Image (tube, rainbow, N blue to C red):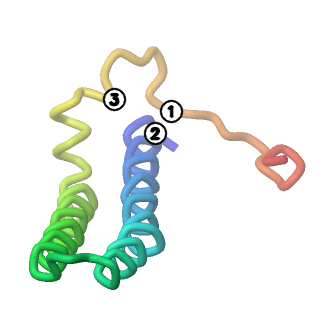
Amino acid sequence: MTIRDFFRILITLFCVYILVQVTFYYIPLNAFSLLYSLDIVWSIVSSILLVAVSYLIFKFLTKKVDNIIDWLKLDKGFDNNIIQIGNFNEQKVY
């Protein structure tokens, strides 16, 4: 695995984390706030904006992973371009 592949995996995992947070935390929280809100229109608009911005961040990060790595220069400055994983099994994960 190269350094670039490692950062691709890391950024993709971050994108999945964002998607899970929005799906299981922010959407239900905003749904319950709609029930107790005095200004329903503002709550609906803010909920839609939150989901839309999160979705756009998710799409941007997943589609432009290589551009982000190049822009932040994440794969520069390493002595070796390859990460040696070796024998990777369940015991090493624990």
* Sooner in the amino-acid sequence: mark 1 or mark 2: 2
The residue at 19%/55% (across/down) is 64
Give left or right: position of 94 versus 70. right
Q: Nearer the viewer, residue 91 or 18?
A: 18
Question: Which residue is nearer to you in this view: 90 or 13?
Answer: 13
**Number of the label disc, if any, that sits on residue 10:** none
Q: What residue type is labelled 1?
A: Ile
Q: Mark 3 points at which residue?
A: 75
Check contact, mark 3 vs mark 2: CB within 8 A.
yes
Between label 1 and label 3, give the one nearer the viewer: 3
At label 2, the amino acid type is: Thr
- The residue under label 2 is 2
Under circle 2, the secondary element is: loop
- Report x, y in % for residue 45: 11, 75
Q: Is residue 1 left or right of residue 57?
A: right
Q: What residue type is labelled 3?
A: Asp
Q: In this view, does 51 lie above or below 66?
A: below
What whole-number distance in Å separates the C-alpha atoms at marks 3 and 2? Answer: 9 Å
Circle 3 — which element? loop
The residues tagged by marks 1 and 3 sit, at their Cα atoms, a distance apart of 11 Å
Q: What element carries label 1?
A: loop
Identify the residue at horizontal 45%, vertical 15% (top origin): 79
Residue in view at x 56 percent, y 33 percent: 83
- What is the distance, in whole Å, between disc 1 and disc 2 at their CAs? 4 Å
Q: Position of residue 13 (x, y in %)?
A: 46, 55
Where is residue 58 shown, x and y percent of the image?
Answer: 26, 63
Which of the pair 28/73 is nearer the observer?
28
Badge 2: few (under 14), some or many (20 or more) residues near its Cα, within 10 Å? Answer: few
Q: Do the residues labelled 1 and 2 touch (CB within 8 Å)?
A: yes
**Image point (37%, 68%), residue name:** 26
Query: What percent of the width, then of the height, locates residue 61?
Result: 24, 55
Q: Mark 1 points at which residue?
A: 82
